[in-house]
Image (cartoon, rainbow, N blue to C red):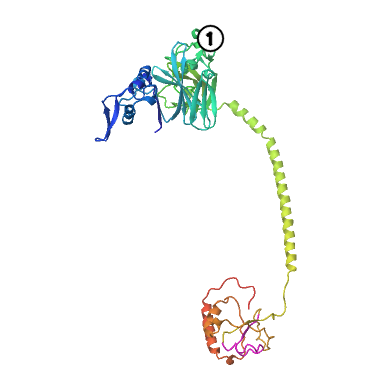
Amino acid sequence: MKISAVCRYRLPDIQKVFEGPYMVYQESSKKWIKYNGNIPKPRPGSCITNEFRSSGYNSSQDLPDNVLDFVKHHPLVSNVVKPMGDQQLLSKKNIVYTHIAVDRVTALNKEQYDVLFLGTDNGWIHKAVVINNKVHIIEEIQVFKTPQAVENLVVSKKQDSLYIGAQSGVLQIPLSGCNRYTSCYDCVLARNPYCGWDGSTCRKPRKPRDWVQMTQDMQNGNGGCLIDTDEAPPMKKMRTVLKGDDVLLQCDLRSNLAKPLWFVNVSEPLDSDDGHLRVGVDGLLITDALLEHSGEYSCYSEESGLQAVVTSYNVTVLLELPKGKISSEPTPIVQLPTPAPQGSSKLEFVYISIITILGGLCLVLTIVLVSISCQQKRKGKYTTGGSRINAVELQTVSSNFKDKSEEMNNYSDGCLQIIPGEAPTSPPSKANPPPPPPPPPLPSEFTNGISTLPNMLRKMNGNSYMLLRQHDEASSPLYNSFTEELSKILEKRKHTQLVEKLDESSV
């Protein structure tokens, strides 16, 4: 919980405590106890006086060793320093005071008062005065918009100013601030020792005769003001509501110490038993208004026994709106907006025209792009005619093929030839194709016969069509084993899910 306290001490009380007795640490009990032994002279911490100088102690460097040892073993004093009045002057919750500055001011009653300037951790200054060992907060000033801690405060009597230092810079504000009070009540209730009421304004006394002619009440804060010296009463405000509606009558008090008082028809207090009237911080709320709630409502600020009117209202509760207002109010409502539809219709025509033009442009561009794309497709290269392109040869893994590879035109040894293009519907021609180029020698891992054939076939795309043409089937000794192995592989391929998109060409 955040809490701050302000205490006041007397210097003689502090000096008396440091005269003794002192504390010493006891090793056996592991705690500090009161020391009742002898205290060396000069006493540690005392100033060098003429008496000590006569004894040869001209500075602290001349002190004997027993004085230094006493300081080492007795660093604590036994008694406490109590504040004046045995209590704090001021305590505030949810506020952290970071710095304090004090100015002593002579008031109109020739007494001196201590004015405290307290800086907070969020950029505020609390200005307070000590009256009869109690603190009265005069005002709260927000000096920094951005919350930041007040790091330093300096009072300048010559400049009649308070200098406030923070991380973002240094500010200067007047010590008195008398111009903030606009009436005699405000000036006297503030109990600001810098200010007094001269009959027309609140200002700081400057001449000796001001001490007699000006008004100030530091003790009670409610004396010296006459009715005719106060500012003119505020103008009455009008409030008209229908029966059953709610209305809020605001009353902004200028002092946090004041309480609002409401009166009806000048002198009648509010009926506390009336459930329709609620007094709050913001003002008076009339809920579900009735006809008898019509009248004059006045809000007074009460502080230290003084009452001053703050605002006044004339409230009128009606059963229904007057007929004259009902017939006259629609007239401006109908006539004023007449130019609006014409302007809006023109804008709509413009918007429709722009949309139509843009739509036409988009249609023209679409037609142009389609025609250009069609022309480019016509200029593309197409290949028609025979499907005899350079033949690609699929070598068998038969060991007998290597011995017969030199005879390129003879395919009786089981050599397979791949013909690109679609498979012909008619039986293939028995004419021999042109001799292919000599195949490269097979790798060593492919020379072991038919045992490696399934691995090669698994690498083929199952979505392609392959025309296998073999001459002189009985010439290959591995024909039966190759056919059986190929049948097994194709049987497995039947249960394999094929890719939906086929290759662009089939083999």
Left or right for 382, reference 457: right
Residue 154 horizontal/vertical position (percent): 50, 23
Tell me what residue is drawn at x 73 percent, y 57 percent.
365
Magenta span has 342?
Answer: no
Considering only vertical position in the picture, is 355 above or below 175?
A: below
Residue segment shown in magenta:
399-419
Q: Residue furthest left?
A: 28
The residue type indicated by label 1 comes to Lys
Which quadrant is home to the N terminus? top left
Report whether residue 134 is seen: yes
Q: Nearer the viewer, residue 237 or 91?
A: 91
Q: Nearer the viewer, residue 437 or 318?
A: 437
Left or right for 471, reference 386: left
Report whether residue 10 is seen: no
Residue 130 horizontal/vertical position (percent): 42, 19
Q: Secondary structure at mark 1?
A: loop
How many other residues sit within 10 Å of disc 1, few (<14), some (14-19) or many (≥20)? few
Which quadrant is home to the C terminus? bottom right
Q: In which image quadrant can residue 303 be found? A: top left
Magenta span has 404?
Answer: yes
Considering only vertical position in the picture, is 346 above or below 427?
A: above
For disc 1, the marked residue is 207
Considering only vertical position in the picture, is 479 above or below 313?
A: below
Residue 305 horizontal/vertical position (percent): 42, 16
Q: Nearer the viewer, residue 397 or 478?
A: 397
Q: Main secondary structure of the magenta part?
A: loop
Q: Residue furthest bottom?
A: 474
